[in-house]
Image (cartoon, rainbow, N blue to C red):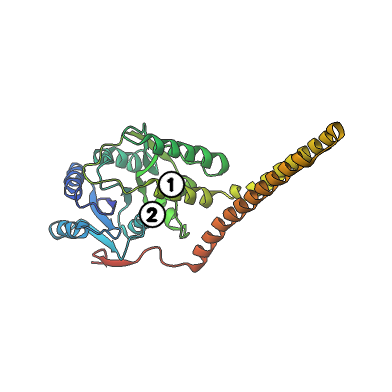
Amino acid sequence: MMKKLSVIVPCYNEEAVLPAFYDEITKVAEGCSNYDFEFLFVNDGSKDATQNIVESFAKKDERVKFISFSRNFGKEAGMLAGLEHCTGDFACFIDADLQHSPELIPEMLKAVDEEGYDIAACRRVDRKGEKKFKSMLSGAFYKVVNKISETYIDDGAQDYRVMNRNVIDSILSMKENIRFTKGIFSWVGFNVKWFPHENRERAAGDTKWSVTKLFKYAMDGIIGYTASPLRIPLYLGILLIILSGIFALAVIIQYAVLGFIYALTLRCVMFSVLFVGGLILISLGIAGEYLARIYTEVKDRPKYLIAKTNCDK
């Protein structure tokens, strides 16, 4: 029997681009005649005609499988659902917007199946077409997370990758509810071959990643893969003690030289109150973030709910 590649495609309001994507991905499959293909579309609660279009593909192509969520659970849940339901010897994550180049799949598949690599992954070579502010935030995120975390995440690493069944099973063994897949990819390790990749322009539609969503995603990555932020109050407390000593010494010197301390003392008290208040709020905020994640994990709710699928047929 031929080996099978499961192409997992998370979708959210992608009706404008899906026909073009389907045309391109099926052409790639035709060029890989020594492999079976499965196209697994995960509809993440789209509000447009995404599901109808995917079902029309499934009616004419038995390789097309779909999972439709009951609501929007996020791309991380979509990727997890794809891995849990795919039946291939290999799995490939690719975005439906055609910013990922489907023509790279044969080379990536060859690296995993023939060259001894466990993962073939794409890494961005530049950030052309991306807003400067977003690029700056993205670069800052990788610098911060790699500075404080034990899990190194490659700057520019993309979700676009092909992996073997051993890697798939290893990722599925990680049961956390709040998932940061880029961190999971790095944490599981394995032998990775990197492919330089220049993002193409979106074929249609708009990006679903706002600055707010990216910030939340970054926070999930930082808090999910390091406990270093919990040590910040300790460091700030040490700094506060040092500053308090300096101010006390300044008050003593002023009193000894000038004979009065009222003005400086008032300023010191005001500064100290504001500084300590800020320190307390920062400490509570950091602890609250970790506590919120513990609360979510303890509830252990399903990571997604399926409204409709043809995967069990």
| Image location of residue 12, percent across then percent down | 28, 54
Q: Dot 2: what SS?
A: helix
* Residue extending farthest left: 60
Seen at 39% across and 53% down, the residue is 168
Tell me if label 1 and label 2 are in contact, CB under 8 Å: no
| Image location of residue 204, percent across then percent down | 21, 44
- Is residue 73 visible from the viewing direction of this image? yes
Residue 159 to residue 305: above or below: above
| Number of marks in picture | 2
Mark 1 sits on what residue? 182
| Image location of residue 25, percent across then percent down | 21, 46
Seen at 45% across and 44% down, the residue is 190
Residue 25 to residue 62: above or below: above
Q: Dot 1: what SS?
A: helix
The three-letter code of the residue at mark 1 reads Lys
Seen at 26% across and 63% down, the residue is 311
Along the viewing direction, whichever of 149 and 218 lies nearer the viewer: 218
| Image location of residue 212, percent across then percent down | 41, 49
Along the viewing direction, whichever of 197 and 74 lies nearer the viewer: 74
The three-letter code of the residue at mark 2 reads Glu
Specify few, some or many for label 1: CA neighbours under 10 Å numbering under 14, 14-19, or 20 or more. Answer: some
Specify few, some or many for label 2: CA neighbours under 10 Å numbering under 14, 14-19, or 20 or more. Answer: many
Residue 150 marker: none
* Gap between marks 1 and 2 measured at Cα: 10 Å
First along the sequence among labels 1 and 2: 2
Left or right side of 3 for 30: left
Mark 2 sits on what residue? 76
What quarter of the picture does the C terminus occupy? bottom left
- Is residue 231 visible from the viewing direction of this image? no
Along the viewing direction, whichever of 205 and 172 lies nearer the viewer: 205
